[in-house]
Image (cartoon, helix red, strand yellow):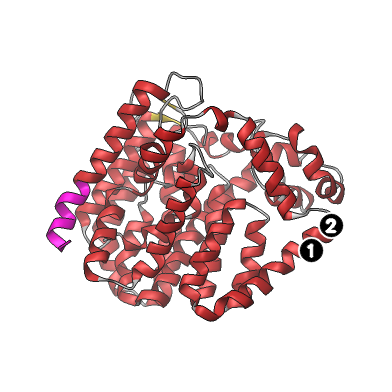
Amino acid sequence: MGARAGTVWVPAAWAVLVTVALAWGTWRVAGSGVALRAAPLMGRWHAPVVGGLAPAALVAVVVVALGPGVAGSLPWRRVPPLAGLAASLWATSLAASAGWDRLTAPLTTRHEYEPFAARVGDLPRFLRTYVADLPGLPVHVQGHPPGPVALAWLLDRIGLSGAGWLAALVVAAWGAAVALALAATRTVAGEAAARRAAPALVLLPAAVWAATSVDALFAAIAAAAVALAAGRHRVAAGLVLGVGLLCTYGMALVVPIALAVGGRRALRPLAAGALVPLGLAATLGFWWPAGLTATSARYWTGIAGQRPALYLTLVGNPGALALATGPAVAVGLALAWARRDRVLVLAGAALAMVALADVSQMARGEVERIWLLFVPLLAVVAPGHRRWWLVAQALLAMALQALLASPW
């Protein structure tokens, strides 16, 4: 596929996928009682609410106007942290458009980690009994290893209690995920590729969910592991992966991405590093394979077992990912393929793991949040030096923020 075809047919294919996912979801899924009332997205549609979007629009205008030039001219060491800071600001401005309380409210529901962690008195006992007690735990706690609860518990114990501090950590983590993805891109594909992608990573539509979901923290862990592996810091990458595996079972799919960028000799040091936090957790009473088995059993006996596999696998999950990444990422993938760009080593591995997660049905719905883990690594192909694609990304993000009432 040539460059011209990539900028003509790929956006059309992206639009068709999103349209089919929305139309099929509205027709057959939204009213079927499977908690996807805005299928393929979690939440519900409402009349546009645009009054609070002025700060987000201002951020978008500044990034579109100045981002490509700044990313291309600043000393490299300043590009990732500045892009990360801008990405955090973008996510915050979108979330706060509905009121500042929207930054913390999604983290305080009965399904979330922080309210439950406040009731955990004895963390070692919680770890020892985690698998046995799983059926009685909140939904999001059931769906993950005990790491997020342990993190919230530790924040409480050092005086950073409450959803405000956790929200601040989540927002900062999203910026870190962007910065680390750019660092990995520079190592894998060169500085020009990283500079080109930077403005597009700032304005990702996925920011709609990143500022209010702990999955943004998981994205930062994944990007850190991949950046370390790309830089041949393989044992350190393994240590980070081990921590990530204690936060989300989906981190297992980041391991092949780290191997892809880390080279053939990365497997043993990655495994050695990962075994340290996993082994420590085991000595405290949490055995990771047992947790995965218990979570899988709860997952399939819950709402996921009722959700339509055909719709979600064929168009629902891919459509949700398309909305989270935006048309610029689809175009970037096509252009990178046409050029056989080395950035595909990173983004292609991320896309392959997303496809594996989809066909294996590890997630039936809600992937706009769950797959935040992969979004920065996948989005590094986006042509952030082209302002019209930045405009398209920003408009999509603001439309989602204005029209979607999301639980995150």
Q: CA distance from mark 2 to mark 1?
A: 6 Å
Quadrant (top left, top right, bottom left, bottom right) of the N terminus: bottom left
For mark 1, what is the residue?
Answer: 280
Residue 28 at x, y = what percent?
38, 22
Disc number at residue 284?
A: 2
Judge by depth and name the residue closer to the eye, 141 or 112.
Answer: 141
The residue shown at (55%, 43%) is 213
Is disc 2 in contact with disc 1, using a CB cutoff of under 8 Å?
A: yes
Camera-nearest residue between 107 and 124:
124
Write the start and end of the magenta stretch as one range: 1-11
Q: Nearer the viewer, residue 147 or 155?
A: 147
Principal SS element in the magenta part?
Answer: helix
Residue located at (51% from left, 63% from top)? 223
Q: Position of residue 244 (x, y in %)?
A: 63, 59
- How packed mark 1 is, by other alpha carbons closer than 10 Å (few <14, some 14-19, many 20 or more), is few
Q: Residues within 10 Å of mark 2 (few under 14, many from 20)?
A: some
Q: Amino acid at mark 2?
A: Leu
- Note whether residue 299 is visible: yes
Q: Is residue 289 above or below residue 198?
A: above
Q: Is residue 231 shown left or right of residue 60?
A: right
Verify whether residue 252 appears in magenta: no
Placement of 48 over or under 127, stated as above or below: above
From what the image shows, is residue 76 above or below residue 386?
below
